[in-house]
Image (cartoon, rainbow, N blue to C red):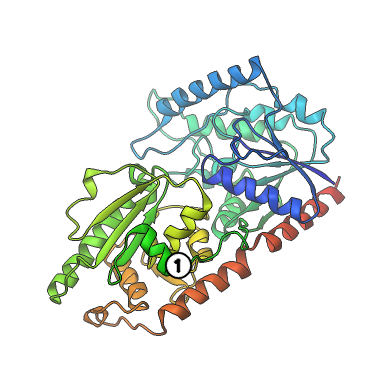
Amino acid sequence: MRVLHLSYADTEGGAARAAYRIHRAVLAAGVDSRMWVVRSGSGDETVMAPFGGLARLAYSARGHVASRLDGLLRSERMTLRSPALIPSGWPATINASDADLVHLHWVGGEMISIEDIGKIEKPIVWTMHDMWPFCGTEHYATDERWRSGYAPASTGNTMDVERWAFERKRRHWLRPMHMVAPSRWMAECARQSPLTRRWAVEWVPNPLDMDRWKPVSRRAAREVVGLGSEQRAVLFGAFGGGRDPRKGFDLLEAALQELHEWRAESGEMTEQLKLLVFGEPERSGARGLGFPVEYVGRLNDDLSMRALYSAADVFVLPSRQDNLPNTGVEALACGTPVVAFDVGGMSDIVEHERTGYLAEPFEPRSLARGILWALGQVGTHGVGQLPDLEVTGSAASLRERARAYAVETFSSVRIGEQYAKVYRRVGSLV
């Protein structure tokens, strides 16, 4: 079976990296897999942008138009939106190809219009890297209107763009598509949307190459990062995460302030604690936490990321809403426990008090307790100052459990085989 993946990019952004990892996983599983993108950075000969010359210039212009449209539609919460309005040449190119099945990924940025997706004649498998496939224009919904199919709302003289986009999808997506969710939460959302609830929806996590993503020498990693032998490192990272309210950096700051106050009351010094932030430039707003903050910028190679994860004592994912962040899976693969709010797909990443800690949603004090729980596993003092907080086991056992869970759940070998089965089921229905 020949499978064609369609994704805006292959290495630029979390959804693109997840899509590329799926492509490589199914290739390793023996599937004849290719990937078509607008922007390619992998240098992989199985990934190509099928349009050249003037068409590439046109796509560059489409990107500018997409940015303007997104800017016009964004709300105060800075939610990314894609009206998917501009016609493209993708349907004709895809339908004329020798692909037996099309695997859609993140196709925003005006890569392909809603109407054009409906013109694809081949069977479609769609991995939902966010909520856009079953919502209106939003990639992450800011309210619950999608559950009702965007029932008419009072918008005054303002156009209801979410209902408009949703109705376009309902009119043009007449053939069922096979929906795949990287998290159980996303799968349940798709089953509740009037657009996708009658289609097949199943859960298949995103893959990670566990031979490539594994712990490096902790001592060497800490030397590279510049951590002293007594320092404890809390790690946060998301590309642009500090500017995106959905990623919850403000909640992490509040939790760390709670942590500083707790430790100050116990008479302990907080200089031994350090916050490491990757994925964005320094922000003045993160000052005043009572301990050092270091911005390490964007790390573009896997080895540097592995060293950073391996050096950290805990990785914090304070997202208000998220699917299955690559960073959480990468941290586990490197043996680093994850602390997150119990929302979205976080319970697929974290086994509470086994591979990390699931905090009460959006409560900074609960998040701080989770951080202390994880630090307690590596010998940080003062955990007993918190009532009803039990710390058992050791740093080694916690890191071993994190790594073992990642291998068992997210191994690219395992996930590649699961997708191969999906393709065979979908292909047998044609």
Residue at 46% from the left image edge and 26% from the top image edge: 67
**Could one spot residue 317 in this view of the protein?**
no
Quadrant of residue 256 within the rendered picture: bottom left
Horizontal and vertical percent position of residue 18:
59, 49
On-image quarter of the C terminus = top right
Which residue position holds label 1?
A: 336
- Secondary structure, mark 1, is loop
Q: Is residue 217 left or right of residue 183?
A: left
Residue at 52% from the left image edge and 76% from the top image edge: 401
Taking the view exactly as shown, the residue that stands out farthest to the top is 54
Front position in the image: 251 or 13: 13
Residue at 20% from the left image edge and 65% from the top image edge: 271
2 to 273, vertically: above or below: above
Q: Is residue 407 left or right of residue 13?
A: right
Q: Is residue 54 left or right of residue 95?
A: left
Residue at 48% from the left image edge and 68% from the top image edge: 350
User: What count of labels does the image hold?
Assistant: 1
Residue density around tag 1, few if under 14, some if 14–19, many if 20 or more, within 10 Å: many
